[in-house]
Amino acid sequence: MSSLKKLIRSGQFASGTTDLEGLLVTHATSFKKIWSTHEGGPDNLGTTFYDPVAIPHGYSSLGSYAQPNNIPLFGHILVAKDVSNNPLKPILKLPIDYVLKWTSHFLNLTKDGEGHAVGYEITNEFKKPPLDKVSCVHVNFVDDTTKKSSLNVATKVAFESQNFVDLNGLNVHGSMGGFKLENECLGNLQGNAMNSMPNMTQINVLIKAYSPVIYFHPDEEYLPSSVDWFFENGGSDDEQYWIHLPDDDASRERVKKGDLQTARAYYHIKPVFGGLFTDISVWIFYPFNGPSTVKVLSFTKHFETVGEHIGDWEHVTLRISNINGELNSVYFAQHGWGEWVTASALEWDTNSKIVVYSSLHHHSSYSKPGTVLYGWKGKHVVGMLDMAALSDKIMDTGVEAVVVAAEYLGGAVVEPPWLNYMRKWGPKIDYKQVKDALHAIENSLNFILRELFEKLIQYLPKELLGENGPTGPKAKNSWNGDEELRFAQLIKGYAI
């Protein structure tokens, strides 16, 4: 990592600090344990709370750090310094009081003593922490993430001014009244924070260092290709859909299988959290998405047409800290939603490359091999199967990588014309076989399972059912925003 830092360190990017226009932030990576529970959370292994230690001189702690116990200790907490030199409008202030919002005292858990959420500080004793232990940040430097706390720890703090809020709390309330904020996180709402973003030279170094290797399922027939290869070999404009497959059967089957030799990864670089992080989205194009496999209790059905569609865009996103240039986490996209995995929990190959597993036919991305059921698990096991496994079908996304967009760099990156094609990357397909197959399954189920199966079909992405062609990268919700850990309303993924 030290050699990588030497290569990418230039300007504010990876300098060790980021100046959010008057609020200087850096990482505290040394912690002391406050309290832990050994039940609940991911894998039912509980969560441990930490306080930062060895905070640099002049910086203030912004809160406690929490991490689930199913992964090695990894992470950081931001500490901040007010460098605005404006005593009349400070960015940081001390809280005037703490209000107890949560305690473990009445929880029947295996735990190390008792834990208490006092403000957004976690304590292991039933008394308020010192007022100078943490600082509050002006509202102009926080942003609503719209994400819910996975720890279900609600916090509440009273502050000297209604313009100051805590960074990790839920239901924050000012002592003067008049506002209520949820799930605040540090960001920069003041304007330009691009000085902390990587330049093109640094981007190329980051891609070389962190570009993942994709392992396709050993039975995968429908591999990726470059967009140019697809345009050269695909069907012509039929006055309804610009993007299609060839008309003759032999060419059609050849194009559906893709061309791994020409396949390229298309990179989109964007700032998130006000320039605290850089997201590097790695987009892969597949000419064809294969049929699905559905599981109903012990019955597994491999369809011939259900789930097929022309054109399939998939991606993973690498989140890089702009403070030190290190990989923080990776987002694995799966059927319109997905999951974040921290760097410490990733699989790396012998060449120190991040490993991504692509699911059979659907091309969803996973951090581990195995089979995942998208549906309901428990008494009723109904859903669609994603199967991922190691094989000799491999794509190194760093080889001949193409950066297609980095809007914050202005005209430094020329976007290819196809990136702004906003229509469907394949025709709408109404397979009679799809409807017949689905009706056959429904008719074979009892009333309860039939209702669950109907909900499953309702909430799966429409393109998996052959009802609509997929959209290109720039038409996705994730293009301009932060990747979210999302699930369809009733659909969840379960490893089986």
Image: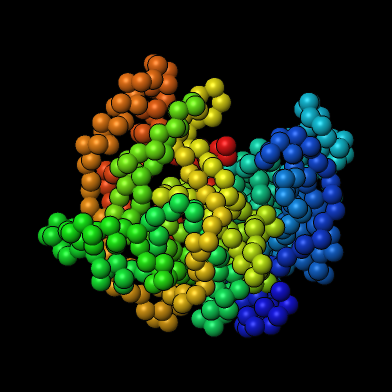
Left-right relation of 55 to 434: right
Where the N terminus falls, by quadrant?
bottom right
Toward the top, the furthest residue is: 447
Left-right relation of 71 to 318: right
Answer whether residue 66 is visible to the viewer in this image.
yes
Q: Quadrant of residue 5?
A: bottom right
Above or below for 293 versus 379: below
Q: Residue at x 73, y 57 (%)?
A: 74
Above or below for 286 versus 433: below
Q: How is the image coloured?
A: rainbow
How many numbered badges does the structure rendering display? Answer: 0
Above or below for 188 versus 159: below
Q: Residue at x 57, y 39 (%)?
A: 495
The one nearer the camera, 146 or 444, is: 444
Q: Residue at x 20, y 61 (%)?
A: 246
Toward the front, the furthest residue is: 250
Image x and y of residue 492, in percent: 51, 37
Q: Residue at x 43, y 47 (%)?
A: 335
Where the C terminus falls, by quadrant?
top right
Left-right relation of 160 to 180: right
Image x and y of residue 368, in percent: 60, 51
Image x and y of residue 10, in percent: 63, 83
Q: Quadrant of residue 57?
A: bottom right
The one nearer the camera, 294 or 59, is: 294
Answer whether residue 424 is visible to the viewer in this image.
no
Image x and y of residue 415, in percent: 35, 75
The one nearer the camera, 168 or 23, is: 168
